[in-house]
Amino acid sequence: MSATSTAIELSIPSDLAEARRVQELIEGALQSAGYTQHDTFAIKLALEEALVNAIKHGNQLDPDKRVFIVFNVTAERFDIRITDEGPGFNPDDVPDPTAIENLERPCGRGLLLMRGFMTEVEYHGRGNVVRMAKVREVPA
């Protein structure tokens, strides 16, 4: 039952204001596809973490580097791929923020939130590409 689909490709500078613009665009596409407030909130939170990671950690806030976003929204599924121009990282090297010794350290929380709110989270290439998906149960 994949009636309507919105597929969009974007390229933005490493600017947090541009990331917010992308979030608003995606929120509108989710609302048009009938996503609940709960699902929209979950996606927006994971999306914000992924974009901030790409801009701050990947591109080091370098205004000459870009973040590339490709997303697709259907009634059943939201897919997004975010690519930065940074050197990448190994997500397995990020400390577990729920471990006792890391509770007061800020690192790793964004990755934890992304995994918690999305159905699928995968890193590709050298770790500078993240693909996330949220699969919905749509009433027949």
Image (tube, helix red, strand yellow):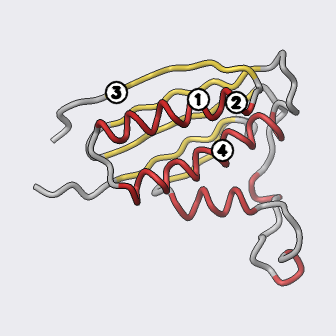
Identify the image quadrant of residue 7. Answer: top left
Q: Nearer the viewer, mark 4 or mark 2?
A: 2
Q: Nearer the viewer, mark 3 or mark 2?
A: 2
The N terminus, quarter of image = top left
Identified by mark 1, the residue type is Arg
What residue is drawn where x is 15% and y is 58%? 139
Identified by mark 4, the residue type is Ala
Identified by mark 3, the residue type is Thr
Q: Which mark is residue 6?
A: 3
Please give left or right for residue 19 compared with residue 33 in the image. Answer: right
Q: Residue furthest bottom?
A: 100
Q: Can you identify the residue that label 4 sits on?
A: 50
Q: Which mark is residue 21?
A: 1
Q: Are marks 1 and 2 in contact (CB under 8 Å)?
A: yes
Q: CA distance from mark 4 to mark 3?
A: 20 Å
Q: Are marks 1 and 3 in contact (CB under 8 Å)?
A: no
Assign a secondary structure to mark 4. helix
Q: CA distance from mark 3 to mark 2?
A: 23 Å
Q: CA distance from mark 4 to mark 1?
A: 14 Å
What residue is drawn where x is 63% and y is 45%? 48
What residue is drawn where x is 58% and y is 51%? 46
Q: Residues within 10 Å of mark 3 (few under 14, many from 20)?
A: some
Residue 96, placed above or below residue 62: below
Q: Can you identify the residue that label 2 sits on?
A: 17
| Image spot of residue 80 (x, y percent) | 50, 37
Q: CA distance from mark 4 to mark 2?
A: 14 Å
Q: Residues within 10 Å of mark 2 (few under 14, many from 20)?
A: few
